[in-house]
Amino acid sequence: MALRNLRGAALAALSIAALATVSFDAWAAGTLRVGMTASDIPLTTGQTDQGGEGMRFMGYTVYDSLIEWDLTSADKASVLIPGLATEWSVDPDDNTKWTFKIREGVTFHDGSPFTAHDVVWNFDKLLVPESEQYDPRQSAQGKSRIPAVASYKALDDFTLEIITKTPDATLPYQLAWILMSSKANWEALDKNWEEVAKAPSGTGPWKLTGFVPRERAELVPNEAYWDESRVPQLDKIVLMPLPEPNARTAALLSGQVDWIEAPAPDTIPALTGNGMEIVSNAYPHNWTWHLSRLEGSPWNDIRVRKAANLAIDRDGLKALLGGLAIPAKGFLPPASQWFGEPTFEVKYDPDAAKALLAEAGFSPENPIKVKALISPSGSGQMLPLPMNEYVQQSLAEVGIEVEFMVVEWNQMINLWRAGAADPSVDGSQSLNFTYFIQDPFTGLIRHLSCDLIAPNGTNWGHYCDPEMQALFDEIKTTFDPEAQNAVLRKTHEKYVNDALFLMVTHDVAPRAMSPKVKGFIQAQNWYQNFSGITIEE
Amino acid sequence: MFAYLIRRLVYVLPVAVGVSIICFLLVHIAPGDPLTAIMPVDATQEEQDAMRSAYGLDKPLPVQYAIWIGKAVTGDLGKSIATGRPVAGEVFSAVKNSLLLAFTASIIAFPIGLLLGFIAGYFRDTFIDRLVTAFAITGVSVPNYWLGIVLVIVFSVQLGWLPSMGAGPGGSGQWAWDYAHIKHLILPSITLAVVPIGIVARTVRALVGDIFSMDFVQALYAKGMRHGDVLRHVIRNAAPTALSVMGLQLGYLLGGSILIETVFNWPGSGFLLSNAIFQRDLPLLQGTILVLALFFVSMNLIVDVAQAAIDPRIKRS
């Protein structure tokens, strides 16, 4: 005991010494240095790469979209709010025709005014290969985000019309992906996107003042930002790609960064022990097994699906993850505005699971056999190996024997796109994948829609159900947001009641930060607002 | 000497072509799709096909190779799929950073390795020899990425003396020879130096020990030559092999530092290579491997020529 005290005292002394001697970089007051998980600075030209992290740090900082997410509250799920469009409506006589009122008085960082013509120019940048501003790299990131858009035109400087291919009430959610870059800046830089990448111009609250590829990007406040409540208070944000989790932790502990994304769970005690703060919140992300519904799949039996969902002690799994998880009660997080009131309760009840399996003709002595595709790592996959082994053990205890097929993450994405019927999945009936579930399309429709069965879309399991399809159609044709939310709740209830996935847990987007960082409100969203943050020296 | 140099240069050509073919094919054998990393995970097949065509990845492999090597000889290594930036520029800046690290590690490793090896060889089979040999074996055996992590925990996290990552307060783009930057070099270069110290020490120990037991050394002593002059002969005989080992180690330091650069987030060629591998960025991967392989070939050439300059017997053979 004495020895332990002595060691503790020594460590504390060393920690104090560490804090006292940290003076590596003489940054100006009010600089936030962020250690990202990305291995490079996200694409800076407008439509970012690197998924949600790219949009978070290089998307909604430098750029705006017509419609944005409300990132002001930590207590409730984010909703859409006006961005560069102040209002929008759909023609009651023609539900494919939308009109958007463009915000007046907004200027790009280069000083050029933002108008409806810029929106058209930006859409062409993504959707029209013949246009001179077409950028394959931005198109690769943005085109698939706006599948509903058929055509668009500026009716005048501040009025935009968009026609959709079919009536689609999810258009506002789709538009929240599309970021507006400056035509004037592109023209000033010889119409060369590589040059724009070095000196981009958006309308966002932050301006990119320079970056060293793979090392850092520096953003300073846009003092003339159109939303005065979101003019940044910091002097600067420095973004640093630090893909290796231990390197991120060491960088935070040694004072080289003030904020790291996704600390590894086993480093949390060291971080909190050294005075760092761990912030987390529910957000639209889940960790599931996507189930095959091809003929012959054991998951076609609802009793088996429900039994699997009842077999997992999610609180135990949460403990395994250092408390950084929300046990799943459904496909969406329990706090989601679309959760609804499902009748099937997703909980740990091994006896009920065994009873259901017995009814289906199986038991731990006579187990049902399933094969699952898993990856050893991957973006958003949390800790896939121990988590899947935990699930495997839980399922074995009730009578579901799991064989794993382990593939590397990039290959996993390919197998996900290929679908359960593809020979490359080698007969696997389950696939462990984490999903971005922030809007109706990415959250619900794309996983189970009949017209999106892989490889045409991301309905990996080949599920097709007329009742579900009718709900999806209703989502798309319900233009009143509240009425649409009601349909979304019904849809999610069906997800849960039919136990369509093995619903395991939700990530909580943990980040660790120095106690100097003040004023951060973690929205229940993939994106965050950095404008209210200050650094206390 | 000039004829020897020309002959060696001619030998380099087929090696370089072979290396280019191997590195081109190797990256195609690896599973995974380069487009996976750069497109949204739910991009449609049509969108993927369009990108594949845009990057020429839909062409047969020999055609892709011919296009690639044709441009490579003019210095154009194509554009990175992940970033769109020219590969040559990416590789150049990364190799520059790795060279900085490699040469710093060499400055630490080679004198220490040579000294330790010479001492151990000179005092062969004594306590000093065993002590140095144990040290050298430890250096070779310790996983250097593990050593890197330990150094970070002690000197960055606990003591706060040295930074744990990066190439200077402003990144490698603002490198300067001042303490603010040099301290970023200290931990990674020490970590990187440990293996070459061990290898050079062990090689030199064996060489020096063997040479001391050779007849000509005994003859020199018998002729009454002073100890210092005999040592000079021993060193001269050991130098070509020692130089060869150090040359190979320099190649290792440049290309074999993936883990070290990852641990320290050092923006060098190893770090670039690991990013390229994880992103399946074929042009970047091919370009980086090619440049590193050619560097290795060049190092061998330089070492051979240097050996020939030191030891005329090599030139004649």
Image: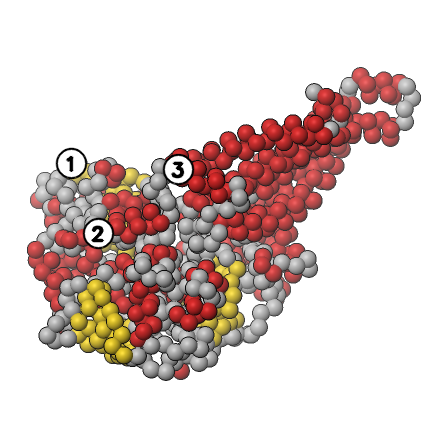
B12 and A537: which one is in front?
Answer: B12
Secondary element under disc 3, as helix, strand or loop, is: helix
**Residue A346 shows up from this direction:** yes
Q: Residue at x 60, y 28 (%)?
A: B11
Q: Chain of mark 2?
A: A
Amino acid on which disc 1 is placed:
Asn
B94 or A486: which is nearer to us? Answer: B94
Which of the chains bears the disc numbered 1?
A
Residue wearing tag 3: B63
Callout in the foreground (2, 3): 3
Q: Nearer the viewer, mark 3 or mark 1?
A: 3
Q: Classify residue A226 by image quadrant.
A: bottom left
Q: Which mark is residue A366?
A: 1
Q: Secondary structure at mark 2?
A: loop
Q: Amino acid at mark 3?
A: Val
Circle 3 Cα neighbour tier, 10 Å, few/some/many (<14 / 14–19 / ≥20): few
Q: Earlier in the sequence, mark 2 or mark 1?
A: 1
Evaluate if marks 2 and 1 touch, with contact meaning CB atoms under 8 Å apart: no
Displayed quadrant of residue A341: bottom left
Q: CA distance from mark 2 to mark 3?
A: 31 Å
Q: Are marks 3 and 1 on the same chain?
A: no
Q: Position of residue A433 (x, y in %)?
A: 28, 50
Q: CA distance from mark 2 to mark 1?
A: 36 Å
- Residue type indicated by callout 2: Gly
Using a 10 Å C-alpha cutoff, classify the residue at mark 2 as few (fewer than 14 neighbours), some (14 to 19) or many (20 or more). Answer: many
Q: Which residue is mark 2?
A: A457
* Residue under the image location 14 percent in, 53 percent down: A450
Element class at badge 1: loop
- Whole-percent x, y for residue B261 in the image: 54, 48
